[in-house]
Image (spheres, rainbow, N blue to C red):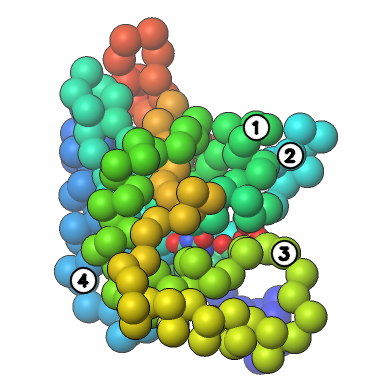
């Protein structure tokens, strides 16, 4: 089949205003739960999301990261957290421009969820707590990898890994200073449900002064 003929018909559901909670955090929690619990292939990770960042010249880059926590803080505000290396490309871009977007594709439910907001580093104690909860292999990986920098070879990377593995046998690894969480505070959420004939449902919440406003967008 040629690429131009590749397409699916989306008919799994609909999204109508009366179905939506006035609070996008409640709606998010419902959709996340549905994405997690619906039947999906084994490789599927409901918490995988595309994170887009941009430098100060507006050059955008995107990659997948894993959502590790979401926490409504009350009064409409809340945060979504992912963990990374603060010196990576994304980390450096966020430091110079904290505006980010997150995008989930829950294809098994024919759903997409877009979030735009501002990222700030998580509390040190929160990052340290999460770091120590990770499997030892992941802790070693975070210590050994200067994420997004050029390495001479795979061997060099494996040697660094071995050095940290040896160190981990005699001492407890601590969270590197340049590794931790980012908390994203959304200013908009867009819930997308595929519909037949490309007449998809798109409902967008935007933060307006002190509350969320819900509007329908044309597909
Ligand atoms: C399924 C999946 C999950 C990932 N989760 C993370 C993550 O939680 N944190 C992270 O730093 N990188 C994660 N990565 C790797 C990133 O996509 C990316 O390669 C890396 O963070 C370097 O990005 P950067 O150079 O733009 O900073 C994941 C990749 C995939 C495919």
Pointer 2 residue Cβ closer than 8 Å to ligand 1: no
Q: Is residue 64 above or below residue 156?
A: above
- The residue shown at (34%, 78%) is 170
Q: Earlier in the sequence, mark 1 or mark 2?
A: 2
Residue 139 picture location, percent across and down = 39, 69
CA gap, disc 4 and disc 2: 37 Å
Please, what secondary structure does the residue beneath circle 1 have? loop
Q: Count the marks: how many?
A: 4
From the image, tell me which residue sits under label 4: 38
Q: Is residue 82 above or below residue 98?
A: below
| Marks 4 & 2, CB-CB < 8 Å contact | no
- The residue shown at (29%, 79%) is 40
Pointer 3 residue Cβ closer than 8 Å to ligand 1: no
Q: Is residue 169 left or right of residue 4?
A: left
Q: Earlier in the sequence, mark 4 or mark 3?
A: 4
| Marks 1 & 2, CB-CB < 8 Å contact | yes
Q: Earlier in the sequence, mark 2 or mark 3?
A: 2
Residue 48 in view in this figure: yes
From the image, tell me which residue sits under label 3: 149
Pointer 1 residue Cβ closer than 8 Å to ligand 1: no
Q: Which mark is residue 173?
A: none
Q: Nearer the viewer, mark 4 or mark 3?
A: 3
Which of 106 and 160 lies nearest the eye of the viewer?
Answer: 160
From the image, tell me which residue sits under label 2: 55
From the image, tell me which residue sits under label 1: 97
Please state, as top left, top right, bottom left or bottom right, where the N terminus lies in the image.
bottom right
Residue 110 picture location, percent across and down = 38, 64
Q: Is residue 156 above or below residue 216?
A: below
Q: Quadrant of residue 156?
A: bottom right
Residue 184 picture location, percent across and down = 42, 37
């Amino acid at each position: 089949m040629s690429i131009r003929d590749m397409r699916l018909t989306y008919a799994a559901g609909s999204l109508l205003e009366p179905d939506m909670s006035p609070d996008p955090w409640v709606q998010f929690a419902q959709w996340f739960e549905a994405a997690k619990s619906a039947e999906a292939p084994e490789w599927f990770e409901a918490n995988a999301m595309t994170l887009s960042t941009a430098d100060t010249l507006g050059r955008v880059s995107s990659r997948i990261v894993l959502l590790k926590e979401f926490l409504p803080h009350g009064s409409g505000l809340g945060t979504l957290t992912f963990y990374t290396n603060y010196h990576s490309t994304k980390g450096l871009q966020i430091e110079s421009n904290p505006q980010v977007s997150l995008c989930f594709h829950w294809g098994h439910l024919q759903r997409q969820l877009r979030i735009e907001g501002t990222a700030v580093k998580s509390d040190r104690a929160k990052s340290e707590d999460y770091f120590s909860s990770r499997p030892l292999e992941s802790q070693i990986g975070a210590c050994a990898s200067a994420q997004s920098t050029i390495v001479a070879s795979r061997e060099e990377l494996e040697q660094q890994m071995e050095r940290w593995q040896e160190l981990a046998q005699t001492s407890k690894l601590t969270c590197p200073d340049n590794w931790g969480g980012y908390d994203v505070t959304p200013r908009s959420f867009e819930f997308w449900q595929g519909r037949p004939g490309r007449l998809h449902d798109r409902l967008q919440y935007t933060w307006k002064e002190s509350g969320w406003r819900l509007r329908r967008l044309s597909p």
